[in-house]
Image (cartoon, rainbow, N blue to C red):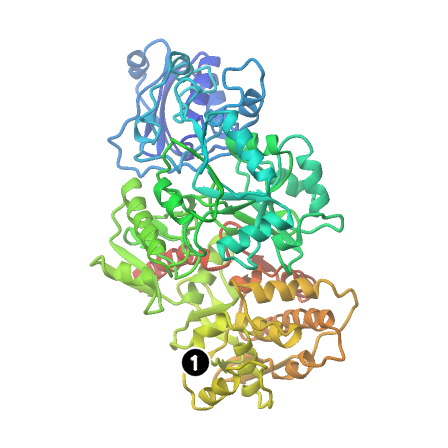
Amino acid sequence: MQLCWLLHIGGRIQGVGYRPFIYRSAVALGLTGWVRNAAGQVEILVCGEEEGLDRFYQTILHQPPAVALPKLVRKTVVPASECLKSGRNFRILPSHENSESAPLLPFDLALCDDCMAEIHDPVARRRGYSFTNCTQCGPRYSIIRELPYDRARTTMAGFALCFQCEREFNDPLDRRFHAQALACPACGPHIVFQTGKGNSVGDPKAIEDACALLQAGGIVAVKGVGGYHLLCLAESGPVERLRMRKHRPAKPFAVMFPLTGQGQKRIALEVQMKPYVLKFLLGSRRPIVLCQRAASATLAHNIAPGLDTIGVFFPYSPLHVLLLEKLGQPVVATSANISGEPVLYEDDRARLQLNGIADGWITHNRPIERPADDAVFCYASKGIPSVIRTGRGYAPLETTLPKELAQPTLAVGGHQKVTIALGYGRRAILSPHIGDMGSARGREIFQNIALDFSRLYRINPARFVVDMHPDYATSHWARSQGKLVIPVAHHFAHASALALEYPRIEQWLMFTFDGAGYGCDRSIWGGEVLAGAPGRWIRVGRMRPFRLPGGDLATREIWRSAAGLCWEAGIDWQPSIVHGPLAHKAWQKDINAPLTSAAGRLFDAAAHLIMNMHQATYEGEAPMRLETLARQWKGSMNPWPVSLRITNGLLEADWAPWLPRMLDERRVKSERAYMWHLTMAETIVQMASALKSNYHFTAVGLTGGVFQNRLLVHLLKAPMKSCRLPLALAKSWPCNDGGLSIGQLMETACRDTLKNMD
């Protein structure tokens, strides 16, 4: 019996070769009909015998291409007469643009195995070509100008296909069928290597000359998929030169290893490489992964000064693959930007701002429409990667909210590590990492992407969700749009972001620990314990607050946190700093000494008291160095005493008893650093146990930047398990401020639902 189905498929199906896959599946089963793009979905009219339709249905949903994640939106049985209209064959129709459903913006993918083999094939016409791609790999997000995703709507529109490429593009059985970024040496983009001495055009000459400069210790700016990298050999001299020119004295660099030759063996010598980590690194998205430095490591220590972890990754574009293969050794590959700003991607601006840093340039004539920095992950749990920074290959990230938003909504995050999240109904879309808002360019890129998202997804936000802090640039911009603005407390957003990852958990106890966030009482929170669920959080505990001398100055001058703790505890202690006495007088008069409960500042204080570290040159440097020092201690100890008390209705943990122990120089520094972490973990466990008698919860959540500390998380697992307190950690989006926007969206959706219930 002939049947006719109309299927609407959503999910991740744009830019991943899904329509050609549909075509091949239908033809193989002898089915007729058509398939087409329709603004973020795929529509399929398929006709045939019931058995064939069932097999087709199971294939396209459960055996899709590797990077596709299809979801059935709707299945309709249509009159059999449609079979006659569809003809005797199965066809791929042009994209249908008159759909009200919002599209999905595909992300950039790493070079696939087939294209990898092709650029090394001595007889292939794309041998050694830096822009080789197919439907399973290559740029998407970074080149799209409009949706649906068709070549004419990308930055490849200016490259007319040659005869051979056009034949591949139009052949449904070819892996390049409708590969929108399709190119070859005859019709596609080309690279150019530039120095003050002249230009080298095209493969392989440009790559050879760039490698010669790198081998001589030079620094090369490379235009990649979503922006520029700065590259140098992963050796002490070139790295020091890069640090000096970039004014980046200590912040760690990532290291890119060759994908071929000895690259995989070398990475295993440099970092502790588990099989599941290597598989993740070699996947279709190629993120940076933070790994423990190996005992056999030979990489220069100034790549990550004072740290025992290194960010490592493999090349993801043909250009990077060919460059690293020719070079034959790892390179530092760091985002080309001014510290904290979004990655540079416009050619003219990159040339201007990197002048004096780079000795040479590999650039090309394929425009980048919007920046996409590299995604960064770590492994806080065995076998489960956690996002530290969203980016290329992982964003825009779409997820489903458990509750429906009352209106289309744009959440704009905080002030640092900014992302945005666009939502309507139960759909939520998280942007890639944008950057900090402390510069004019950071604010410009933020505004561009906020407007760009609304345009591309065809969603006009009726309201904006902002951080409760009154002075954030993101909040100022949202208020300037003349629409409803909803403030959400910083730590409520952190908590709701984590809760979104675990929709089955209805009642939480959340530890939201970070460096600073505007609290509901207008003080600086950061060591908070929340109970409840999104839309109805209550603060039930905290770290003991103290007055922070100098306020925001303490984020870099970490001695101020230590001074504030000691003075608050009545310890007559003076830091060996010129400004110490003046700061003490101001603190005594309560001048620029805001009250804070921030756990991040406690870690800063511990780094100063234990390591005598005065300044931090980048955010998180002090806690990261303290964690590295703590891992050097191999003894077993009991934690320092934990003191809990009820203050103003809150369970409060007092850090004062720990101060003499941190200052006890009879104990080696590594022991004190380890004891600090062990005691902080014990404090969290005891607080959770104490609160269990008064508040019903089924899981304990750990969120906020402090819980990027893998040692702290490790020390929590066993005691929490023994107390039968299940732990939940962020995985899909950052627990730091990069996850604020998706948390703001979740919090708002749940508030909308509660309001409708009242």
Q: Which residue is mark 1?
A: 594
- The answer to whether residue 385 is seen in the rendering is no
The x and y percentages for residue 60 are 47, 26
Of residue 80 and residue 346, the one placed in the foreground of this image is: 346
Give the class, few, some or many, for how many residues have Cα within 10 Å of label 1's Cα (few <14, many ≥20): some
Which quarter of the picture shows residue 464?
A: bottom left
The x and y percentages for residue 36 are 34, 24
Which quadrant of the rendered structure holds the N terminus? top left
Q: Residue furthest left?
A: 482
Q: Image point 50% across, 21% down: which residue?
A: 55
The x and y percentages for residue 67 are 50, 33
Residue type pointed to by label 1: Pro
Q: Is residue 676 above or below residue 230?
A: below
Q: Is residue 168 above or below residue 597?
A: above
Q: Is residue 237 above or below residue 600?
A: above
Of residue 638 and residue 500, the one placed in the foreground of this image is: 638
Secondary structure of residue under mark 1: loop
- The answer to whether residue 248 is seen in the rendering is yes
